[in-house]
Amino acid sequence: MVSAGQMAGMVSTILLPLLVAVIPYILIYRRSSKIESGMMGAIGYGFMGFVWQQLIYLMLIILLTYLDTDFQIISGNFILSSTVYSIICGIFVALGLYWGIYLTNQKQRSLYRSAVIGIGFGLGSVAWNIWVTYGMTLYEAFRINTGSFSGEEELKASILSTSVGSMLLDSYKCILLLLIYLGVALIMGKSYLEGTKRTTWAVPIFVQLFISLTNAFMRQYMPALGSKIAFHLILTVMAAAAVWIVVRWLKTGNH
């Protein structure tokens, strides 16, 4: 039987990122609602921006991995392959965010909607990494407890052994990334509206490159527990910086 604590952990893991996303959305919406609309549309652009860039990124990596070319040599070198994968990932993240910012500014230029693109993009990451995975896990957990589970025993054992702490840590990671994407989208939106193209592209690429490389090198060269703790601490600092940027922007009224 899946314990009540595990079930509660799955539900919390699914809901917490959404609840956190609502807070900055409300703060931005309250400032913008008197002068413009389209915030939910911006959320949708951001969400879809994550989905399509992630799909294309994965298909590209699979294609490159199976090509009989020099790319196989790159794949055999951890440092080189990690750098290449991280750069490609950074470019696609920038494309997904830029796509949303570009579309939401076609009819009316708005830094509010541009920032909200980051929330939608972060929710896309949550859906990809949390809602699908833990939604299915929660469904199978109900089936286990009701005696209707018919899947493989390995899946059942995996669900039964999943700790609440690991679930909440996955949720916390996605929350941090959502806040980071919000800050990145705000900087991108401001740069886009000011016509500073280099900053518009450089910021998301650099931020994602740093996140991806840091995660890869820590997982490779540090003990599993230590790398996980250190990586989440780094993400926490980055998310705190992103929150500070957004709060300062809302307070200054430079919109």
Image: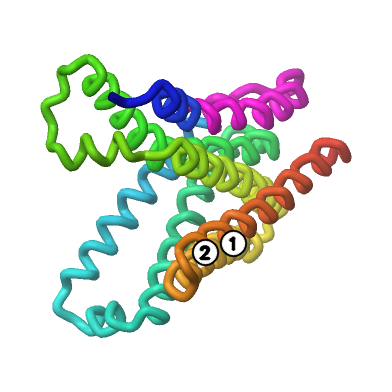
Q: Residues within 10 Å of mark 1 (few under 14, many from 20)?
A: some
Q: Residue furthest top?
A: 146
Provide the major secondary structure of the magenta segment. Answer: helix
Question: Looking at the figure, which quarter contains the C terminus?
Answer: top right
Please give the name of the residue rendered at 43% of the width and 44% of the height, measured from the top-left corner.
50
Cα–Cα gap, marks 2 and 1: 5 Å
Please give the name of the residue rendered at 16% of the width and 69% of the height, measured from the top-left corner.
66
Residue kind at label 2, given as amino acid type:
Ser
Q: Which residues are magenta?
A: 15-42
Image position, residue 40 (x, y; %): 55, 24
The answer to whether residue 47 is visible is no
Please give the name of the residue rendered at 30% of the width and 56% of the height, measured from the top-left corner.
58
**Quadrant of the rendered structure where residue 26 is?**
top right
Please give the name of the residue rendered at 18% of the width and 42% of the height, measured from the top-left corner.
154
- Describe the element under mark 2 as helix, strand or loop: helix
Question: Looking at the figure, which quarter contains the N terminus?
Answer: top left
Q: Which residue is mark 1?
A: 230
| Image position of 219 with respect to 15: above or below | below
Image position, residue 109 (x, y; %): 66, 37
Q: Is 56 displayed left or right of 122 in the figure?
A: left
Front position in the image: 90 or 166: 166
Residue kind at label 1, given as amino acid type:
Ala
Magenta-span inclusion, residue 62:
no
Q: Are marks 2 and 1 in contact (CB under 8 Å)?
A: yes
Image position, residue 209 (x, y; %): 52, 66
The answer to whether residue 44 is visible is yes
Front position in the image: 81 or 29: 81
Q: Which residue is mark 2?
A: 227
Q: Residues within 10 Å of mark 2 (few under 14, many from 20)?
A: some
Magenta-span inclusion, residue 34:
yes
